[in-house]
Amino acid sequence: MDIVVGIDVSKDRLDVHVSPLEESFVVGRDAAGLTALHERLKTLDVACIGIEATGGYEAIVVASLGGAGLPVVVLNPAQVRAFAKAVGQRAETDPIDARLIARFVAATRPEIRPLAHEATRLLAELVARRAQIVAMITAERQRKRQATNPRLLKSLTRILTALDKELATIEAEIDDAVRGSPVWREKEDLLASVPGVGPQTARRLIADMPELGTLSRRKIAALAGLAPFTRQSGRWRGKSFIAGGRATVRCALFMAAMVAVKHNPILKAFADRRKATGMSRLAAITASARKLLTILNAILRDKKPWKHA
């Protein structure tokens, strides 16, 4: 039986469980702890190391293990939680431990993909920072519209000026990174050739979904969290829904789909057909986002831009 490892990440420590050897140990989430973890795991013929996404604490662990050549995969917390309930975890508030993560890995055999290289990670951080600054600008503009006190208005104006300047700097850095790379420049031009997909959407996809163009349409939809699931029991069949996946990619595709159903003839016809069957506008937009992702995946796979035929 293959050896799999589950790692429960917290702020200061890593709880590790090795299955089926049933070995458990703890190391620090620091340089010394990661070195000790490398040395211990490299003595084993590990098939997969599963780490649950924990809001950022896992990043250094994943990068360290991946850099050491170990087969590591970041797990979707919602999927691990569903597995926990399926195997009798008592309540949603019960902690997910390393042993349970190892059981999940052994049962589901998640696909191990190559980790993004340093340049891709930097681009992803820049794109994420841009989104944060845009959100701050939106919030400050809303406050400025509601403010009446002259001192508050001056303060808001100063903050907005600083944020606008920082946004311009970040966008220049992103532009330099993308247009300075022949591979990224080609990808951006191919993606942006589709009506409804602008440079920001293209760059979000390049940064947060480097697998685009290399996977099947079903796998890429699941990766973005746009693959539909249906509640079903016996003869009863509930409504389909989407869950999991990469929220930043899904949000970018949803916004692009809202534009595409107005200006892209193929997606407009697609959405109209869905609504004609009684599908709600929101569901039609979601289906259009999935269709758009399928088109973009094929465009990068074939390296052929959009055609208006």
Image: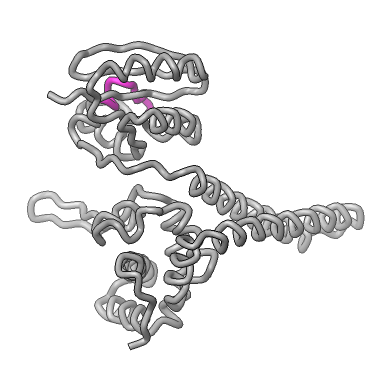
Quarter occupied by the C terminus:
bottom left
Give the residue displayed 35% in from the left and 24% down from the top: 7
Give the residue displayed 59% in from the left and 50% down from the top: 126
Image quadrant in which you'd find residue 267: bottom left
In x, y percent, where is residue 21?
20, 14
In x, y percent, where is residue 163?
74, 55
Give the residue displayed 35% in from the left and 47% down from the top: 244
Magenta span includes 47? no
The residue lying furthest to the bottom in this view is: 309
Quarter occupied by the N terminus:
top left
Q: Does the rendering let one see residue 241?
A: no
Camera-side residue of 263 and 113: 113
The residue lying furthest to the left in this view is: 234
99 up-or-down from 52: above or below: above
In x, y percent, where is residue 211?
35, 53
Camera-side residue of 148 and 297: 297
Q: Is residue 202 left or right of residue 288?
A: right
Q: Does the rendering let one see residue 164?
A: yes
In x, y percent, where is residue 157?
83, 58
The residue lying furthest to the right in this view is: 150
Tell me which colouring the rendered structure shows.
one colour
Residue interval drawn in magenta: 92-102
Q: Is residue 47 left or right of residue 13?
A: left
**What number of labels is visible?**
0
Camera-side residue of 193 and 117: 117
116 up-or-down from 41: above or below: below
Give the residue displayed 50% in from the left and 45% down from the top: 121
